[in-house]
Image (tube, rainbow, N blue to C red):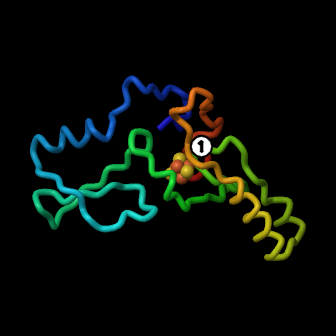
Amino acid sequence: MPLDAGHTWDRGTMITADDILAELSRQFTLTPHGEARGSAPAERFLVDGGPSTVGIIASVTRPFCGDCDRVRLTADGQIRTCLFATGETDLKPLLREDATDEQIADAWAEAMVGKQAGHGIDDPTFLQPVRPMSAIGG
Ligand code: SF4
């Protein structure tokens, strides 16, 4: 994913979900796991009929943003509603001003209403966020 600190991610060298499946299928028979994926990032497969499984997280080539229920609070007090959000909601002022739980919850809910529909990596207007993965909590 284009979330690297050096901003050197290159679509041309990306390993796609199809690439991974093709490589694994050279040695194993993979079948869809069958259980509902929900908001889990990994698409799971049974290996040689199970019980072993393998999961593929293909954020770019098989995005799962439509089922995403994720949000993160960074160590510096920012709510990020998507890994690729270019904006953040600063909770620090509320926390430092002894805001009520309700006020904090309202601010959080307001941020969630603005959660973008997806990462937009395939959109020509896509801009890589300034802060890399390591700066927003993993
Ligand atoms: S909406 Fe954002 S955080 Fe959620 S899966 Fe898509 S890219 Fe990841």
Task: Please name the residue that numbered disc 1 is placed on.
Answer: 84
Local secondary structure at mark 1: loop
Q: Please tell me whether residue 109 is drawn above or below residue 2 in the rendered image.
A: below
Q: Amino acid at mark 1?
A: Phe
Kindly tell me whether residue 109 is visible in this rendering: yes
Q: Is residue 33 above or below residue 116?
A: below
Image point (60%, 50%), residue name: 82
Q: Percent position (x, y) of residue 74?
A: 66, 55
> Residue 129, located in which quarter of the rendered image?
top right
| Residue 10 pos. (x, y %) | 45, 25
Residue lying furthest bottom: 101
Neighbor class of circle 1 (other Cα within 10 Å; few <14, some 14-19, many 20+) is: many
| Image-quadrant location for residue 100 | bottom right
Mark 1 CB within 8 Å of ligand 1: yes
86 sits left or right of 90 in the view: left
Of 88 and 137, nearer the camera is 88
Q: Quadrant of residue 131?
A: top right
Using residue 119 as the reference point, say whether residue 99 is left or right of it. Answer: right
Q: Position of residue 63 (x, y in %)?
A: 44, 46
Residue 85, percent from left and from top: 64, 45
> Is residue 95 shown left or right of residue 112?
right
Farthest residue to the top: give it: 12
For residue 99, above or below residue 22 = below
For the point 71% across and 58% down, the residue is 113
Q: Residue most toward the right?
A: 97
Report the label total.
1
Q: Is residue 138 visible?
A: no
Q: Residue at x 43, y 27 (%)?
A: 11
Residue ID at (72%, 49%)? 88
